[in-house]
Image (cartoon, rainbow, N blue to C red):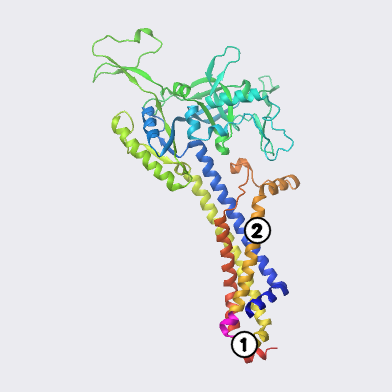
Amino acid sequence: MYQILLTRRYLVSKIMPMLAAAAVLLCTAMVLIVWSVMGGFLTMLINSGRTVVGDVIIAWPNAGFAHYDDLINRLEQDPQIKAATPIIETYGIISLPDGRKETIILRGIDGESYARVTAFEDTIYWKPLDAPLEKDTARLDPRLDLLSGASLQRMRSEGLTLTKIDPKTGAESAALVMGIEVSGFNRRRPEGYYIPIQRERTTPDGEVDWIDTFLPRDGRLLVSVAPLNTEGAGADVVSLASRYFPVANEFQSGLFELDQRMVLLRLDACQEMLKLGEARRIVRDAQGPVVLPDPTDPSEESFDEPGTRTVVDPARVTHVFVRGQGDMSRGDAAIALADRCRAIYRQFAADHGGQVPRAGDIVILTWEDRNRTMINAVRQETALLLFLFMIISLVAVFLILAIFWSMVAEKTKDIGVLRAVGASAPGVAGLWIAYGLAIGLVGGALGVGLAYLVVNNINPIHDWLGRTLNIVIWDPAVYYFPRIPSEVDPAKAIIVFVGAVISSVLGAFVPAVRAACMAPVRALRFE
């Protein structure tokens, strides 16, 4: 009982124990804030990656593989798989209205199935909003009032189908959905929304011409790609396939790199440009040459020549994205789904022997495998930062040791009195251990509370620093995401709190042993 009474008295009557508790508080808060922000950044990175690729990717880049419809049917019949969608992914060049040319990642998709596998519908940017963004207190987001609801609803519908409807003729044509940062014709406001802007273009005579266009309304862009043959090599090394496409909408995935480089195009149009669509070829005999018919020449519609036959090569895609049933955010769940996809593909390849890549050659990756380089880099950076901050936090241990050592010297006569009235050596040691435990509990609890307060308000704090001191730490162009992660994991909070308490007890251990080993008579004579 006397340990509790003396601990309370020492803790509240001296300034030095308060400084030790403050050191524990700051170290606890520092470690938990860093861990929460970096861990949250990693979680956001993983989740955003899954929003654009699903859970598992089946890939045969460049050349592509055929009979993908059959593979998708087999996948979707499995109870572990929710949906699958065909994808073509390649590199291309896009020509913008101001004369700039940008290298892009061109992804051919089927809008309906792509939305079932990914968060495509949620990433469509130009669509009606029921409420403003959190920071948009002035309601200046163009999606609220400045654009008509009917126009935005039409843009949303056209974006999901990647189809543009001519308002005059009613004709439909394949269209583009671009990353919100691709064109440079949008500017992100500090409140988090984008506004269309004008860009200047230098004319041949040296004058400056201002381009005032809103791409999802009236934009048409030239897309150039290199057509591929069945081996994945350029079908024509002399020229690129180029075609103008209207812009149906733009998307914001949350991954800045994709928002800046990716352009989506309707699958059939992408297959046509890359020569991955269904095609006929004429086979004369087993030893003879293969002749590709001219699709514009009606005379080649049929061949009656003996020893020839028409072969139809099915359309191809380079990837199939798969969405699993249930929660796939855990790496082991995605690995199990990938194993199931391998088993399904193995049977698919056996049934289409010689026409699709072999089961041992096909590339099947989880969402984490796809982004492993970046994810591992963030994990290693998080571990390094935690290690460094934990070393810095050892200051609290040595500070407690130094404070307790001086307090033991100061209270030598009090220790002698306790021993003289019957307190045992373990009891005296327990007094200082309890003292350190109390400091750890108080400092750790206050540190966890401070960390919760800072992390939950870290975006307003960052905005205030930007407004008053012009300090921008979290640049979305660097960190990919527009907001700093703002959630503390309770498990991490418990680990850090327990670590603070243990560190405080360890700091008090050596002074406690010193106090317990004092001879009562010598302690009573101490001046």
Quarter of the picture holding the N terminus:
bottom right
The secondary structure type at the circle numbered 2 is helix
The secondary structure type at the circle numbered 1 is helix
Going by the picture, which residue comes out furthest to the right? Answer: 468
Q: What residue range appears in magenta?
A: 418-429
Residue at position x 54%, y 44% from top? 45
Quarter of the picture holding the C terminus:
bottom right
In reply to whether residue 406 is colored magenta, the answer given is no
Residue 131 lies left or right of residue 249; in this view the side is right
The kind of residue on which mark 2 rests is Gly
- Badge 2, how many Cα within 10 Å: few under 14, some, many 20+? some
Residue 113 lies left or right of residue 525; in this view the side is left
Residue 512 lies left or right of residue 361; in this view the side is right
Image position of 372 with respect to 117: above or below: below
Residue 434 in view here: yes
Residue 464 has which mark? none
**Quadrant hosting residue 353:** top left
**Nearer-N-terminus badge (2/1):** 1
Residue 65 picture location, percent across and down: 37, 29
**Quadrant hosting residue 249:** top right
Residue 398 picture location, percent across and down: 61, 71
Confirm or deny contact between disc 2 and disc 1 (CB under 8 A): no
Residue 419 has which mark? 1
The kind of residue on which mark 1 rests is Arg
Going by the picture, which residue comes out furthest to the top? Answer: 299
Residue 449 has which mark? 2
